[in-house]
Image (spheres, grey):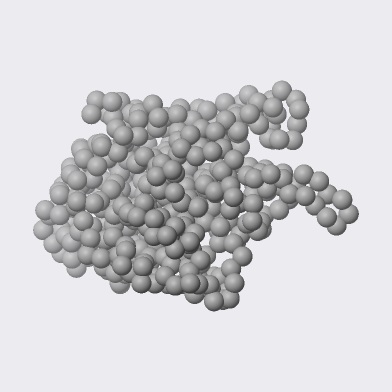
Amino acid sequence: MKEFEKIREDFPLLKEFTYLDSASTSLTPIPVIEEMNDYYYNYNSNTGRGNYKIAIKSSNKLEDGRKKIAKFIDGNPDEIIFTKNTTEAINIVVNGLNFKKGDNVIISNIEHHSNLVPWLNLNNVELRIANINNDYLVNLEDINDLIDRNTRLIAITHISNVFGSKQDVEEISRISKENNILFLVDAAQSVGYTQIDINKIKPDFMAFPGHKGLLGPVGTGFLYLKKEIAENLMIKNLGGGTVRNIEGNNFTLENVPYRFEGGTQNISGIIGLSKAIDYINNVKIENIENYCNDLTKDLYEKINSIKNIEVYGNPDNIHHTVSFNLKGLNPYDISKILDETSNICLRSGFHCSMPSVRTVSPENGVIRASIHCYNNFEDIEKLCNELKLISQLS
């Protein structure tokens, strides 16, 4: 507990605000910001394009970040593609696979829009939806029933950004392999909160943000892409850094992963993300997971005990995110009151997951409180005391 109280010193914003919106964007610790500033102050240069000292240093820092990311998820560096967020990572897969007319893709009804809209946008591909059960888990029987000989891919979120429920991705992966189907995992809400082991999950693709659980800067993320599949993916973002040679009208692509990283990368952001992984490793992911689970349990129980509040989620399988509503009150109004009166930051609405939220609150959405390792039990107590006062209005 003491180590987590000390962590709060690395997040100056917490001196004024009670920040409970980490499922949207986590706070960035001072050491990460200092590492990014060091790049701008002392070796600001492009990567892979110069043989002078500071260009070599920035290039090496970028590749060190790739190695560090790979080690963090127990993957290989040549299977890590830098992106600006999870959305871009998923779109690389959606636009890279050569779908045929009649193919179908299976997702769930609790996906973030990033793992929904790109699939909806595909022509001649049927999107099939597996429903969640009463425990807010994707129904595995639904997945099995939806599979046929034209099923090309299953794409599932690891932890729901609305209900906090952790899906059995290892079992879904087994189902996909058994049926010779590709498998994509949206890890936006799990990486940095729980240990990710690519060799246990065995996905073909796994999309990650830098700015949520990993405590990294915005505009960073990465895609795990199994190498043997990567060689056959189409590439939509071609240009600087993606080709080895051009002769006449013909060009030769760079090796994987560089062929997918067109143009100048977010160099300072990736360097910051690399430092953020150091930060997570120093605290230890197992400590973060246990502490956040304790906070989440306390958050769920305290909110659930307040009169006129309806909480969504299974208390036995809920991770760092608790969504709820106060009966008779608009969630937007509640979040605004909390902000104006108490500097409490949490999100309301549909959370870029309309189908998911509409399973429980079709009209106005829900309020969502989400935590990270820089939060404490006092934050939860403060929120719940304010909610008790607001609940008297309903």
The percent position of residue 321, horizontal first and vertical second, equals 29, 50
Left or right, 313 with respect to 352, comes to: left
Number of numbered discs present? 0
For this orientation, the residue located farthest to the right is 248
Q: Is residue 198 visible?
A: yes
Image quarter (top left, top right, bottom left or bottom right) of the C terminus: bottom left
The percent position of residue 328, horizontal first and vertical second, equals 19, 68
The percent position of residue 31, horizontal first and vertical second, equals 46, 27
Q: Nearer the viewer, residue 130 or 239?
A: 130
The residue drawn where x is 61% and y is 65% is 98
Q: Is residue 276 visible?
A: no
Is residue 114 shown above or below 39?
Answer: below
The residue drawn where x is 42% and y is 70% is 147
Is residue 127 shown above or below 303?
Answer: below
Q: Nearer the viewer, residue 210 or 218?
A: 210
Image quarter (top left, top right, bottom left or bottom right) of the N terminus: top left
Quarter holding residue 110 = bottom left
The residue drawn where x is 20% and y is 37% is 378
For this orientation, the residue located farthest to the front is 178
Q: Nearer the viewer, residue 289 or 325?
A: 289
Is residue 386 shown above or below 291?
Answer: below
The residue drawn where x is 18% and y is 56% is 390
Left or right, 55 with respect to 17, comes to: right
The percent position of residue 389, horizontal first and vertical second, equals 15, 53
